[in-house]
Amino acid sequence: MTAAEARISPLSVVIVGGGTAGWMTAAALARLIGNSCIVQVVESEEIGIVGVGEATLPHLRGFNARLGIDEADFMRATSATFKLGIEFVDWARTGDRYLHPFARFGRDANGVGFHHLWTRALHRGLVPGPLDAFCLPAAMARGNRFAHPAQDDRRIEAGYGYAYQFDATRFAPYLRGIAEAAGAVRTEGRVVDAERHPETGDVSALILADGRRIIGDLFIDCSGFRALLVDGAMGEPFEDWSAWLPCDRAVALPCRTTQALTPYTSAYAMAAGWRWRIPLQHRTGNGYVFASAFIDEQAATDALLGAIEGAPLAEPRVLRFKAGRRRRAWVGNCIAIGLSGGFLEPLESTSIYLIQAAITALLELFPEGSGSPVERDAFNRTLDLEYARIRDFLILHYHATDRADSAFWDYVRTMPIPDSLVERIALFRARGRIEPHAQGLFLEPSWLAVLIGQGVLPRDHDVRADMMADADLAAALREMRDRIAATSDGMAPHGDYVADYCPAGLA
Ligand code: FAD
């Protein structure tokens, strides 16, 4: 039988778990390759979902668009706001503040990145502002403004990215509606066991608590931190990265909003980790991500309670995790997507992106049966690369700091870091070079924002930035800064924009 003939009978795909990962996967498979597979989701209401994961990256817009999701409808349903980037407060030293926007800085000239011009001006005392004064969405964030980017690339209001901040408990149900409308079938039940084929070792069926048996060809493990299949059934080892990323707990607590609706997520450095603030339409999400080796749960909870802006809307909830990932995400006929495949703390809002990256890779490598080793290896390589890049990027935030005000900051500032990151920092420090890569997270502007924000300044710049006279460079920078500030000032306040475009009501 040829591969094309094999595809005539659709593959039976069983997804375990109905959180963000489970329903994103189900919606994508049912909507985009529904002729090649039958999609079933098994989930247990009694167990529930992790219920956090509110800040996203711009890539989600591409995912939603491929599924035909209307943006305003999705934002209303999930009580979402717009996100232009992440604000980091007190990270390099207390009192510091910088933004990691989803956009480039300035304008390149003479074939060289803008930051080389900025660095040259800085070294000559010419710079009329910090790096993010040369980035429109950063100025919009500072002024709590928002507008959709213009379509015409020649305009200053074009070319920036944006993402969403949404209520995690509303996202999975929203996707469930899309998946079911496209033919996915949901089964309520608690998985208690998995049968494996005696020769191949593949998973052949799931056993539910009431004795039902669910058979399938391909099993997607979206069971969250429980990792029922990839760990429980297949025993795939976990690669522990907690020596580099020691935060292993979070206490989460939503509160009433008392401030203007910010178009960005905030990350405040704390004594033993950091605190998130995520503004939604109906409430503000807060959490303290901390390292239990340096602070206990009660002290972290007290610190969070002391820092939030409004009255709490729930009891504080502690979540436990470990930084790292499964050595292989796809093993046999079982693929881990979501928290079952690994976890990197939410400092750069990367988990939902990783779910999306895994789904994209699965669509591209969708197998005929349980999959061939080449497909599995290609899938695993893609995920390896994504995880490793994010890992290094996160470590940078902790390691490149002058903070020495707690045992936690002493540890992360002085810990050995991966060679890949040592090389990146050294290359940038020497002459502002950031090694480019075409795919995945994070691209040059992101590294630039965080390197400069954390106080890693190049000693010198690219020689191609020397072609402009000092006075011309200073005038061009001033003109760019002023034009960006004026454009941002002319935009609507973010709160008004959201109220007009996608009001969710207060429910
Ligand atoms: P879950 O939501 O836990 O879903 C697991 C599913 O499996 C549930 O439906 C459950 O019922 C089911 N299940 C489990 N066991 C069984 C069983 N035996 N039988 C049947 N069903 C079962 N990500 C971001 O992108 N941005 C963020 O800002 C962000 N913040 C985070 C903050 C914290 C503190 C944490 C811990 C995570 C954060 N994340 C964030 C990650 C994000 O929450 C997850 O990636 C996302 O919610 C996906 O979770 P999941 O679907 O893999 O797991």
Image: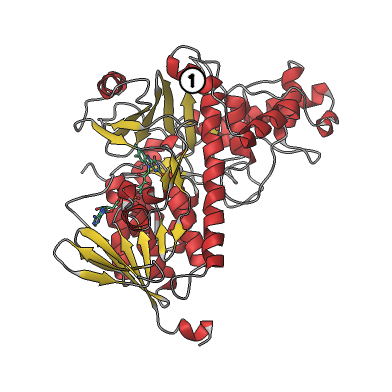
**Position above or below: 116 against 159:** above
Residue at position x 19%, y 31% in the image: 315
Q: Position of residue 436 (x, y in %)?
A: 69, 44
Of residues 354 and 413, the one drawn nearer to the viewer in this rendering = 413
Q: Position of residue 475 (x, y in %)?
A: 75, 25
Mark 1, ligand 1, within 8 Å: the answer is: no
The number of numbered discs placed on residues in the rendered structure image is 1
Residue at position x 49%, y 36% in the image: 85
Which part of the image, by quadrant, shows the C terminus?
A: top left
Q: Is residue 175 left or right of residue 35?
A: left
Q: Is residue 8 visible from the viewing direction of this image?
A: yes
Q: Amino acid at mark 1?
A: Tyr
Q: Position of residue 167 (x, y in %)?
A: 31, 44
**Position above or below: 39 against 446:** below
**Position above or below: 356 against 52:** below
Q: Is residue 444 left or right of residue 50?
A: right
Q: Secondary structure at mark 1?
A: helix
Characterize the local packing of mark 1: few (<14), some (14-19) or many (20 or more) Cα atoms within 10 angstroms. Answer: some
Q: Position of residue 121 (x, y in %)?
A: 74, 22
Residue at position x 34%, y 55% in the image: 222
Q: Is residue 137 visible from the viewing direction of this image?
A: no
Residue at position x 53%, y 41% in the image: 390
- The part of the image, by quadrant, that contains residue 304 is top left
**Position above or below: 378 against 297:** below
Q: Is residue 436 left or right of residue 169?
A: right
Find disc 1 in the rendering and name its residue.
Answer: 411
Of residues 157 and 275, the one drawn nearer to the viewer in this rendering = 275
Instruction: Name the image colouring.
Output: secondary structure
